[in-house]
């Protein structure tokens, strides 16, 4: 037994000879150790030692010097004592040196290195509140305290003599075994942190382990000790911070509702849940404003995102994008109504009732052993957007309050991103609808050109831009082609685009030349910018910038095959000749619209029949990963390859030029030129003589008959008579009459005067003033346009009645 606080008798003295045999045994010695003199005398002193003598005692004895030291002695009943003894050398001729050994006054329990204190030391190890174990030089288990055997789920007897890998042949015990052998090999302590579940535990724990070498006095490693400290709480606190940090970095990377919901479930599954789903209210999923969740009524939701630790989310009973209903009074409905998160376990009756309301859901819960559920409402700015379900089935520990707080935190962050994405999606959809409503639905049927186009809104999440295009029929079978781009994005840019497109159409009807039209448009942009000002623009990114735009405007005449072009800060158009060669027309760039005070210049080129004119916005040829020259080169290569139709050419251009999702809106307008030949055009030069009126009327009548349209003879002769009369009376030479048969019958009379005609109301007794009024009555439309040498007055008659 162990001895504590033993008082050493004053007469406890013994004499030991040079061979270590007791010669004298006092009563005090008997009282201290329990041996009778007859049992002790003649016995070797080493028989009563519980451990080797201290090195200092051995050294002094060898030198014949007096010594004092702590000596571990063995009591007769098996107990151990640590006694402070004093030794004094005695000389004896027959026996050699003798030693008188007396006891000191104090005794101590045995310490780690002394068997006299081993019992107390063992008790201290056994009762340590942390797991401790020791292993021999072959990393085989020797002993452990109660905390360690409890964690391992095995007794000392079951583990003794085995390595950790033999005790638990799976991860992470293979790593622990490797570390122990490294410590045995190097003699250096190793600190190790890891997460795992020991056999005697019901959940994973985070541990900090000190694997230390056990060395003898010579420094030789005789084994290792393992002291394990549970740091699970600190681990989960760090893990929660890591999850929150991950959520702040990953959630909300795009302005897309679905992608934001996907980011939320991905963060939660990698962080602390086994299966997570996001159900958005049906109104939110459709892009509308969230509807109020009525208490006591079913709620319709749509599955927007889901993720699982199992591949393919086999736990899900609702497919992505599928709509479902939460029953009235069910836990999901309650969470939506209250807006508060809730924890549910297997024994919750309300949760079980909801689960059993669906056979598929009940089967999935039982099959995958779902045992813990959290429901957290997705709310932002006081508005409920949907519900997030967190489930555990692979993780054995149920959700706790800390998990609920973490879930509410990441859902709150995600909700703001979802709401931002929802608002953006709605605005973008509105802007896109506005923009599309302002663009032509389909290329019009034109006699001058065959047209095909592509309009691609930005697909990177940016706002809808202000790109637009148009093909405007003009008088004389001509056509105006326009492509423009308003600076900025969003609804404001789309609205500005619509105003500019309307302005271009209005100015085109006036038959302004391209450079004059851009000058008028430039003034309009300046006026709009002055009227609105930055403070009226809803988009903060646009508020700091002035209103501006670029534009390309071209007018093509299929009779003369002449095309007049001008541009305002816009990329140059590409021309593909009938032989397939491609070049970019070198016309003055001109300043962007909105700068003011700078001139625009137009050029005129003659186009062969079948030429292809390509107009586009900068989003087609400019990109972040290349300069505009590289984009123009790609466009040139795409246009140089022949295709069967303009539609296929459009697709070929987009495939070749675009290397990824466009970062800006793109407009591509292709126009293949047509020509109106002599069989559809008739021209006569007329003298400035009243007699020429009858001659012109006769020419027109004969031509109408030749074209097989006798029903239009009277009206055509009337129009020709009035227009020629006006040219002779009010205009100047040269006077020319031209008839064009197209989808309509066009009558044009040109003269050398720039004075514009106007329609006036003649009084009853007036002899003249009714000519243009008659023209307006018998024609479908009429008008005038300026030419470099004068003007042209024209009138059109419909041919629909002749079909």
Image (cartoon, rainbow, N blue to C red):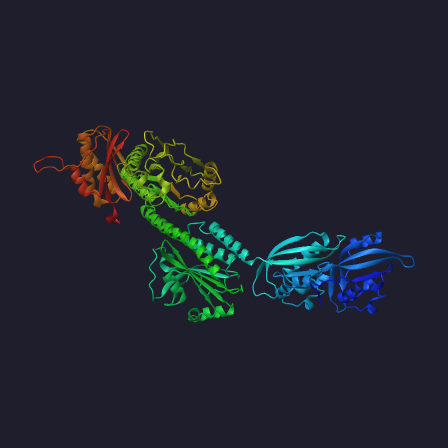
Q: Looking at this view, is 797 or 327 the one in front? A: 327
Q: Residue furthest right?
A: 94
Q: Residue at x 34, y 55 (%)?
A: 289
Q: In the rendered image, is residue 140 in sight?
A: no
Quadrant for residue 153, please give it.
bottom right
Quadrant for residue 542, please give it.
top left
Quadrant of the drawing holding the N terminus: bottom right
Q: Looking at this view, is 593 or 669 the one in front? A: 593
Q: Residue at x 34, y 47 (%)?
A: 431
Q: Residue furthest front?
A: 10
Query: In this rendering, would 265 be left or right of 229?
Result: left
Query: In this rendering, would 623 be left or right of 104?
Result: left
Q: Looking at this view, is 751 or 634 the one in front? A: 634
Where residue 114 appears, as percent x and y from the top left, is: 73, 59
Query: In this rendering, would 102 be left or right of 347?
Result: right
Q: Looking at this view, is 759 or 373 the one in front? A: 373
Where residue 449 appears, as percent x and y from the top left, is: 35, 42
Where residue 216 appears, as percent x and y from the top left, is: 75, 55
Where residue 175 appears, as percent x and y from the top left, is: 65, 57
Query: In this rendering, would 770 be left or right of 648?
Result: left
Q: In the rendered image, is residue 202 in sight?
A: yes
């Amino acid at each position: 037994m162990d001895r504590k606080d033993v008082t050493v008798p004053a007469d406890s003295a013994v004499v030991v000879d040079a061979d270590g045999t007791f010669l004298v045994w006092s009563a005090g010695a008997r009282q201290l150790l329990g041996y009778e003199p007859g049992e002790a005398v003649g016995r070797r002193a080493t028989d009563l030692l519980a451990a080797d003598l201290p090195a200092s005692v051995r050294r002094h004895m060898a030198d014949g010097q007096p010594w004092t030291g702590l000596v571990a002695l063995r009591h007769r009943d098996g107990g151990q004592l640590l006694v402070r003894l004093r030794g004094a050398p005695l000389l004896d001729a027959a026996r050699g040196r003798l030693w008188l050994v007396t006891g000191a006054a104090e005794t101590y329990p045995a310490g780690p290195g002394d068997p006299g204190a081993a019992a107390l030391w063992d008790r201290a190890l056994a009762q340590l509140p942390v797991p401790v174990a020791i292993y021999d030089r072959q990393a085989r288990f020797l002993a452990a305290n109660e905390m360690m055997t409890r964690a391992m789920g095995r007794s000392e007897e079951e583990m003794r003599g085995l390595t950790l890998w033999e005790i638990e042949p799976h991860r992470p015990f293979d790593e622990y075994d490797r570390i122990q052998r490294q410590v045995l090999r190097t003699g250096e302590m190793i600190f190790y942190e890891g997460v795992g579940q020991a056999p005697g535990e019901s959940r994973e724990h985070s541990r900090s382990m000190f694997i230390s070498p056990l060395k003898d006095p010579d420094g030789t490693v005789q084994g290792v000790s393992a002291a394990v400290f549970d740091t699970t709480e600190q681990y989960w606190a760090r893990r929660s911070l890591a999850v929150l940090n991950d959520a702040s970095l990953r959630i909300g990377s795009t302005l897309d509702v679905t992608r934001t919901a996907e980011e939320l479930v991905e963060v939660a599954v990698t962080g602390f849940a086994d299966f997570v789903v996001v159900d958005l209210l049906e109104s939110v999923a459709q892009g509308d404003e969230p509807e109020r969740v009525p208490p006591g009524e079913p709620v319709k939701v749509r599955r927007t995102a889901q993720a699982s630790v199992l591949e393919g989310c086999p736990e899900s009973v609702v497919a992505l994008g599928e709509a479902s209903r939460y029953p009235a009074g069910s836990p999901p409905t309650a969470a939506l109504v209250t807006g508060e998160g809730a924890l549910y376990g297997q024994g919750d009756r309300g949760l079980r009732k909801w689960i059993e309301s669906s056979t598929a859901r009940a089967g999935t819960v039982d099959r995958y052993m779902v045992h813990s559920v959290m429901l957290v409402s997705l709310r932002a700015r006081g508005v409920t957007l949907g519900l997030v379900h967190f489930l555990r089935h692979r993780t054995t520990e149920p959700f706790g309050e800390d998990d609920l707080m973490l879930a509410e935190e990441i859902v709150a962050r995600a909700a703001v991103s979802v709401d931002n994405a929802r608002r953006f999606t709605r605005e973008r959809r509105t802007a896109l609808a506005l923009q599309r409503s302002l663009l032509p639905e389909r290329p019009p049927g034109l006699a001058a050109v065959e047209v095909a186009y592509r309009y691609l809104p930005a697909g990177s999440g940016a706002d809808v831009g202000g790109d637009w295009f148009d093909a405007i029929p003009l008088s004389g079978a001509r056509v105006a082609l326009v492509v423009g781009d308003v600076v900025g994005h969003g609804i404001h840019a789309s609205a500005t685009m619509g105003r500019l497109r309307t302005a271009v159409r209005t100015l085109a009807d006036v038959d302004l030349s391209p450079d004059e039209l851009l000058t008028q448009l430039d003034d309009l942009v300046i006026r709009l910018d002055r009227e609105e000002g930055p403070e009226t623009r809803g988009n903060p990114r646009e508020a700091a910038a002035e209103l501006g735009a670029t534009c390309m405007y071209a007018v093509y005449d299929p009779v003369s095959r002449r095309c007049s072009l001008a541009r305002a800060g816009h990329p140059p158009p590409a021309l593909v000749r009938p032989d397939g060669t491609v070049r970019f027309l070198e016309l003055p760039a001109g300043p962007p619209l909105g700068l003011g005070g700078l001139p625009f210049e137009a050029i005129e080129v003659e186009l062969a029949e079948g030429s292809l004119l390509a107009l586009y916005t900068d989003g087609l040829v400019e990109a972040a990963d290349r300069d505009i020259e590289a984009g123009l080169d790609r466009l040139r290569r795409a246009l140089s390859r022949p295709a069967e139709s303009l539609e296929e050419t459009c697709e070929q251009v987009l495939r070749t030029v675009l290397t990824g999702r466009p970062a800006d809106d793109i407009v591509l307008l292709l126009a293949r030129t047509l020509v109106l030949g002599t069989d559809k055009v008739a021209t006569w030069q007329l003298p400035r003589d009243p007699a020429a009126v009858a001659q012109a009327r006769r020419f027109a009548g004969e031509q109408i008959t030749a074209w097989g349209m006798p029903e239009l003879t009277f009206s055509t002769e009337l129009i020709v008579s009035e227009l020629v009369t006006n040219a002779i009376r009010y205009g100047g030479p040269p006077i020319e009459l031209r008839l064009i048969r197209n989808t309509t019958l066009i009558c044009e009379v040109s003269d050398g005067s720039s004075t514009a005609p106007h329609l006036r109301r003649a009084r009853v007794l007036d002899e003249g003033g009714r000519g243009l009024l008659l023209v307006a009555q018998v024609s479908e439309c009429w008008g005038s346009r300026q030419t470099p040498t004068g003007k042209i007055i024209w009138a059109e008659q419909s041919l629909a009645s002749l079909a």
